[in-house]
Amino acid sequence: MYYLWKEQYPKEERIRIKKEISGIISTLKNSVKKHRIDRNFARLEWIMDTTQKKLLSIANELLSRNKDSNTAKFILRTADKVTLFAELTTRGIQIPDNNNHVKNLMGIVGQRIKKNRQSWVDKNLEIMVNTIWQIIA
């Protein structure tokens, strides 16, 4: 919302885009809950791909209006991270949603990784997630 406000989108447009993105993410969250139980990970991967495509579509819509849109750049930069919790579910790792304890642990582990001058490459990210998983399990 901040990027949209900063780019001076009308309030109605900001609300529309926010609702659209929230709906996309809510669908993914609900699908993860369902497919974690029924173990239909092929369907979940299809939903993850659909989520990515919808987010990229929104980013492209914003770029068509303004080629320097920071909102679109933010969506493009973070679209892969949005589906990370669903991808981890397919690997058997469950990340509880809306859990402040987990957020705090991720922050602590993230600070330690950055303090040791490590980067956020897949291997380090997997180490961080496994560490958090061991703490909360």
Image: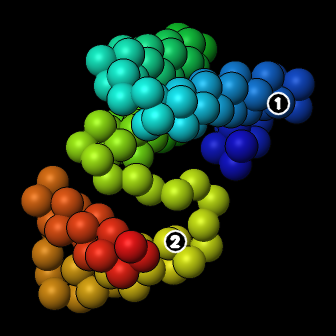
Asked if residue 51 lies left or right of residue 97, the reply is left
The residue that label 1 is drawn on is 15
Asked if residue 24 lies left or right of residue 105, the reply is right
Q: Which mark is residue 103?
A: 2
Q: Quadrant of the C terminus?
A: bottom left
Q: Residue at x 61, y 26 (%)?
A: 27
Residue 123, above or below 32: below
Asked if residue 68 lies left or right of residue 109, the reply is right
Q: Residue at x 36, y 81 (%)?
A: 135
Q: Considering the numbered disc 1 on the image, is that residue within a helix, a strand or a loop?
A: helix
Q: Nearer the viewer, mark 2 or mark 1?
A: 2
Which one is nearer the viewer's eye here, 25 or 89?
A: 89
Which one is nearer the viewer's eye here, 19 or 65?
A: 19
| Residue 61, x across and y down, in percent | 56, 13
Quadrant of residue 122 within the rendered picture: bottom left
| Residue 79, x across and y down, in percent | 41, 34
Which one is nearer the viewer's eye here, 83 or 61?
A: 83
Quadrant of residue 44 within the rendered picture: top left
